Image (cartoon, rainbow, N blue to C red):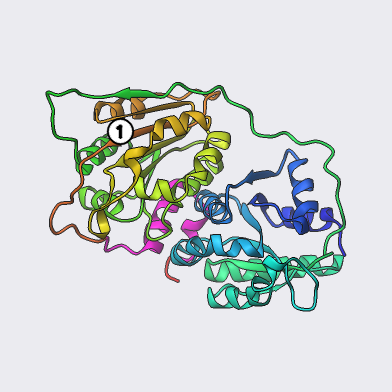
Amino acid sequence: MIEAVQFVEAARERGFSWYAGVPCSYLTPFINYVVQDPSLHYVSAANEGDAVAFIAGVTQGARNGVRGITMMQNSGLGNAVSPLTSLTWTFRLPQLLIVTWRGQPGVADEPQHALMGPVTPNMLDTMEIPWELFPTEPEAVGPALDRAIAHMDATGRPYALIMQKGSVAPYPLKSQTPPVARPKATPQVSHVGASTPELPSRRDALERVIAHTPVDSTVVLASTGFCGRELYALDDRPNQLYMVGSMGCLTPFALGLALARPDLKVVAIDGDGAALMRMGVFATLGAYGPANLTHILLDNNAHDSTGGQATVSHNVSFASVAAGCGYASAIEGDNLDMLDTVLASVATAASGPNFVCLQTRAGTPDGLPRPTVTPVEVKTRLARLIGADQGASHAAA
């Protein structure tokens, strides 16, 4: 058994200063230690997949050897499979995973862990995530971290430590500072009226975004599917990243990047299907989101890239959700000018993220190309542009 301080401080010496995750009783000493240290950063995610995507965003913008750790109960691996297989693996964005081993064979536990316990190592193996048991002796901590870093630096991919019961001694939670409770914004609606019967297209919206996002100071992140492909077709700029897979993970990724890099303006272009898949992240963005983050949701009431099947977004006021979750501002409607207003505004240091949901018509131009730049190339050129560590590694891996 080790003390929380022995692991966290050894990790800090090696650049690990960002933590995200969902609590597990095995992780309690770590979380209690981290949340009481103001020099460390901890984000309480709505689910484990969001935490993985958040730390991936931190890694995308990281400088000076800063690294991140995602913590989860092994049952949460199910929630994290998508970003671990189609975000961190595909883009080569490394992070350290601490996965608790509930239901470990031979250790009595609750019935819900009876299957996940035995298959946990196999799940990590299947996802090509090398792992070892979490160190339980002080002298083993540094070497374990060094092995993890060696793998992460060589491959650009995650490494896992599986934590057994009783690995870390209790650490009391004497005080904590939760995210600031923000005043609830009033959701606004902006319609152009009957004089313009046709809704704007995705292309119309993306053209407005491009016009307001200069390459030297803004990062534009586009959701999976046609959103990223159409942005690429319009103008493939080095300050843009096109999410592939990882549906719903764009916004936690954007949050990680925006928090890690307050010097940049981060614009996340979301879709209604993706937003519905991980709506818990609205609360996370509302609680932690900084003023340099703008969340744009293009809502065409359809899964356009899979044939136009309807979503249930027609029943949702996304602006009301964003406002209720603590966004600094929230507006929705079919007026393209909303994008100009939100993107041209200068956020103050005291405000949180801004949100705009634009209703668009379904449909995509014929012959829409797929990006010819690979995800690793997209990640690397963006990192180089913003002076991040990822620009100097894994470019040709």
Q: Considering only vertical position in the picture, is 3 above or below 278?
A: below
Of the 4 image quadrants, the one containing the C terminus is: bottom left
- In the displayed structure, does residue 387 sit left or right of residue 306? right
- Amino acid marked by disc 1: His
Q: Position of residue 80 (x, y in %)?
A: 54, 61
Reply yes or no: does residue 386 show up in magenta: yes
Mark 1 lies on a secondary structure that is: loop
Reply yes or no: does residue 137 show up in magenta: no
Q: Main secondary structure of the magenta part?
A: helix
Q: Which residue is mark 1?
A: 212
- In the displayed structure, does residue 173 sit left or right of residue 333? right
Q: Quadrant of residue 378?
A: bottom left
Residue 387 seen in the current view = no
Residue 107 seen in the current view = yes
In percent of the image, x 45 and y 21: which residue is there? 186
- In the displayed structure, does residue 368 sit left or right of residue 171? left
In percent of the image, x 36 and y 49: which residue is there? 273
Crowd around label 1: few <14 · some 14–19 · many ≥20 (10 Å)? some
Q: Position of residue 84 (x, y in %)?
A: 52, 64
Query: How many marks do you count on the picture?
Result: 1
Q: Nearer the viewer, residue 291 or 197?
A: 197
Q: Nearer the viewer, residue 269 or 103?
A: 103
Q: Position of residue 56 (x, y in %)?
A: 52, 55
Of the 4 image quadrants, the one containing the N terminus is: bottom right
Q: Considering only vertical position in the picture, is 52 above or below 395?
A: above
Q: Position of residue 107 (x, y in %)?
A: 80, 73
Q: Quadrant of residue 68?
A: bottom right
- In the displayed structure, does residue 158 sit left or right of residue 313? right
Bounds of the magenta segment: 371-394
Q: Nearer the viewer, residue 272 or 217?
A: 272
